[in-house]
Image: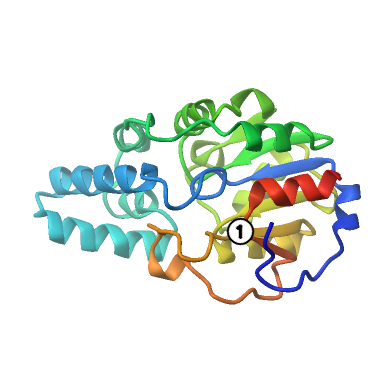
C-alpha cells in the first residue's frame, strides 16, 4: 500500500465508520481500464448524431459540458432537454469483458464492518453491471446513481444531501472513496472521512487533465494508490 502524502487523520478514525461509500468509475476499477474510454467514445457518438456535428466538434462540446456542468448529460439536459434515460442507456451499452474480476477487492470490501454503498454519476444499470463484472455486486447494500439525484451530479452538495437522506446516512459516521479531488469537497464539509484513490505512479490514466491532481488538499483526509491494501489496513 502506498500513501501519496503523510495521512492527515489516524486510521483509527475509521472505527467510527458505519457506512462505506464508494465512487464507481476509476475508483472501484482503476483509471487505466478501458471502460471509461469506451463510454467516452459513445458519448461523442451520441452528441454527433444528436446535433449533426463532426466527431471533433462533438468531442470538444462534450468536454466543455463535462467541465462546466459536471457531466455531459447535465449540459445536454440544460441546453437541449435530452431524454436522460435514453442517453444513459446508449452510452453505457459497452462490453465490460476486458475488466477482470477482482477477488482481492471483494475480500477487502466484505471485511469492512457496516453498510457499503455506491455513489456514482453513472446510471444504476451501469453501476450494477460493472460491479457484477468485478465480482463485488453482492457486497453492496444499494447504489445511488445519477437518476436518484434527479440527474444533478457530484460535486454538487445537494446531490450528497439527497444521498444522505435516501439512505439515512450519518456523514459523521461515514467514509467516501473517490478518484476526483473536487468530488470530495462536499463530503468533507458534511463530516465524512475522505479518501482520494489515485492511480499508481506511471500507470496509464484516461481521465481528463482537470480531473487529475498532483497534490492533496486539506479536504482530503487520506490518499492512496492501493485501494485493496488501504482497506485491508483499516480492518487489520
Residue with the most extreme top position = 138
Q: Position of residue 182 (x, y in %)?
A: 57, 66
Q: Position of residue 170 (x, y in %)?
A: 82, 46
Please name the residue shown 57% across and 60% down the image. 198
Q: Position of residue 203 (x, y in %)?
A: 45, 60
Q: Is residue 87 left or right of residue 235?
A: left
> Quarter holding the N terminus?
bottom right
> In the image shown, does 105 or 78 lie closer to the viewer?
105
Q: Which residue is mark 1?
A: 225
Q: Is residue 127 left or right of residue 54?
A: right
Please name the residue shown 39% across and 69% down the image. 209
165 is higher (above) or lower (below) than 8: above
> Quarter holding the C terminus?
top right
> In the image shown, does 234 or 42 lie closer to the viewer?
234
> In the image shown, does 127 or 203 lie closer to the viewer?
203
Residue 89: quadrant of the picture: top left
Q: Position of residue 169 (x, y in %)?
A: 78, 42
Residue 110: quadrant of the picture: top right
215 is higher (above) or lower (below) than 33: below
Please name the residue shown 67% across and 45% down the image. 228
Residue 22: quadrant of the picture: top right
| Label 1: how many Cα within 10 Å (few below 14, some 14–19, many 20+) | many
Amino acid at each position: 500500500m502506498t500513501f501519496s502524502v503523510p495521512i492527515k487523520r489516524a486510521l483509527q478514525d475509521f472505527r467510527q465508520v458505519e457506512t462505506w461509500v464508494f465512487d464507481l468509475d476509476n475508483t472501484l476499477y482503476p483509471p487505466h481500464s478501458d471502460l471509461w474510454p469506451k463510454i467516452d467514445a459513445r458519448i461523442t457518438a451520441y452528441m454527433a448524431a444528436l446535433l449533426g456535428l463532426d466527431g471533433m466538434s462533438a468531442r470538444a462540446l462534450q468536454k466543455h459540458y463535462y467541465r462546466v456542468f459536471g457531466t455531459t448529460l447535465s449540459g445536454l439536459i440544460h441546453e437541449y432537454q435530452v431524454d436522460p434515460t435514453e442517453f444513459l442507456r446508449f452510452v453505457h451499452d459497452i462490453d465490460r469483458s476486458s475488466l477482470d474480476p477482482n477477488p482481492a477487492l471483494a475480500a477487502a470490501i466484505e471485511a469492512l464492518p457496516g453498510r457499503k454503498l455506491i455513489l456514482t454519476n453513472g446510471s444504476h444499470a451501469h453501476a450494477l453491471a460493472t460491479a457484477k463484472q468485478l465480482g463485488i455486486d453482492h457486497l453492496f447494500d444499494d447504489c445511488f446513481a445519477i437518476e436518484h439525484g434527479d440527474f444533478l451530479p457530484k460535486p454538487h452538495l445537494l446531490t450528497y444531501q439527497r444521498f444522505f437522506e435516501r439512505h439515512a446516512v450519518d456523514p459523521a459516521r461515514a467514509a467516501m472513496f473517490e478518484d476526483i479531488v473536487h468530488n470530495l469537497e462536499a463530503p468533507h464539509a458534511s463530516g465524512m472521512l475522505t479518501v482520494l484513490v489515485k492511480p499508481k505512479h506511471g500507470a496509464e490514466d484516461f481521465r481528463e487533465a482537470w480531473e487529475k491532481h498532483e497534490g492533496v488538499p486539506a479536504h482530503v483526509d487520506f490518499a492512496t494508490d492501493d485501494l485493496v491494501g488501504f482497506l485491508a489496513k483499516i480492518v487489520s
